[in-house]
Amino acid sequence: MHEAEIVAQIVVAAVLGAAIGLEREFGAQPAGLRTHMLVSLGATLFTLAGTEVANTDPTRIAAQVVTGIGFLGGGAIFKEGVNIRGLTTAASLWVTAAVGLAIGLGHWIAAIATTALALGVLWLLKIAERDWLPLRRTLTATLTLEQGARLDEIERLTIASLPIAKVLKVYYTAEGQLLEVSARAPRGASLPQIAESLRLLPGIHGVELSR
């Protein structure tokens, strides 16, 4: 393979990886621009190296790359309250590795088309989910109750003020009772607005929110 073509493949792999990583960077995800660029570059270089070895099946290299990306993607997934975060970022790393493999095998059009579709899924469909699938907009509220507050009354008021709310846990600490609630985020309301509306409910001393 001509050296100029090899350099072109590596550069294109970096650009396509950067395109996906930039979207993740704008979303403040743990794996962003640099991670996706490196994944794409690494997958491309492994594939190119595999094609240069005599009597070697490049698909064997590809299989090992996919296995390695599985471990890397697993590190991007974490549990936050009742929610699992990082699944989309892990999937974007997986797709980025596939783009790098395709570039390494010379499938330029497939790699570019896949990158464009991946960006559409990550960006356009995220907007569609936010606007058309309100059940996906969930949050977890941890409420600190005042001394002597009735738990059943607080539960009733909280469920009445938040859409599709349900009590997950009740804690008893030295400071008092804590109530953990999962609910659908009201459309158009920011976290400070939701927290303030909950704090004004009778019997609630403090509010902590997370998405």
Image: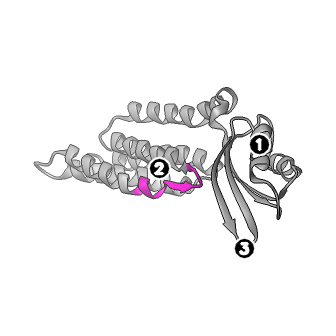
Q: Does the magenta stretch include residue 79?
A: yes
Residue at x 88%, y 51% (from the top left corner): 202
| Real-space CA distance between mark 3 and mark 2, rounded to the nearest whole angstrom | 54 Å
Q: What residue type is labelled 3?
A: Ala
Image coordinates of residue 110 in percent, x first then y, are 39, 31
Mark 1, other Cα within 10 Å: few <14 / some 14–19 / many ≥20: few
Magenta residue span: 72-83
What residue does disc 2 label? Answer: 14
Mark 3, other Cα within 10 Å: few <14 / some 14–19 / many ≥20: few
Q: Left or right: 54 with respect to 71?
A: left
Ranked by sequence position, the earlier of labels 3 and 2 is 2
Q: What residue type is labelled 2?
A: Ala
- Dot 1 falls on a residue whose secondary structure is helix
Q: Does any portion of residue 12 appear in the rendered image?
A: no
Q: Does any portion of residue 54 appear in the rendered image?
A: yes
| Real-space CA distance between mark 3 and mark 1, rounded to the nearest whole angstrom | 24 Å
Q: In which quarter of the image is residue 113?
A: top left
Ranked by sequence position, the earlier of labels 1 and 2 is 2
Question: Quick one: which residue is furthest to the top in this view?
Answer: 132
Q: Is residue 204 magenta?
A: no
Q: Which marked residue is nearer to the observer: mark 1 or mark 2?
A: 1
- Dot 2 falls on a residue whose secondary structure is helix
Image coordinates of residue 149 in percent, x first then y, are 82, 57
- Residue 156: assigned label: 1
Residue at x 58%, y 48% (from the top left corner): 24
| Real-space CA distance between mark 1 and mark 2, rounded to the nearest whole angstrom | 54 Å
Ranked by sequence position, the earlier of labels 3 and 1 is 1
- Dot 3 falls on a residue whose secondary structure is loop
Q: Which amino acid does label 1 sit on?
A: Arg
Question: Quick one: which residue is furthest to the bottom in this view?
Answer: 174
- Residue 174: assigned label: 3
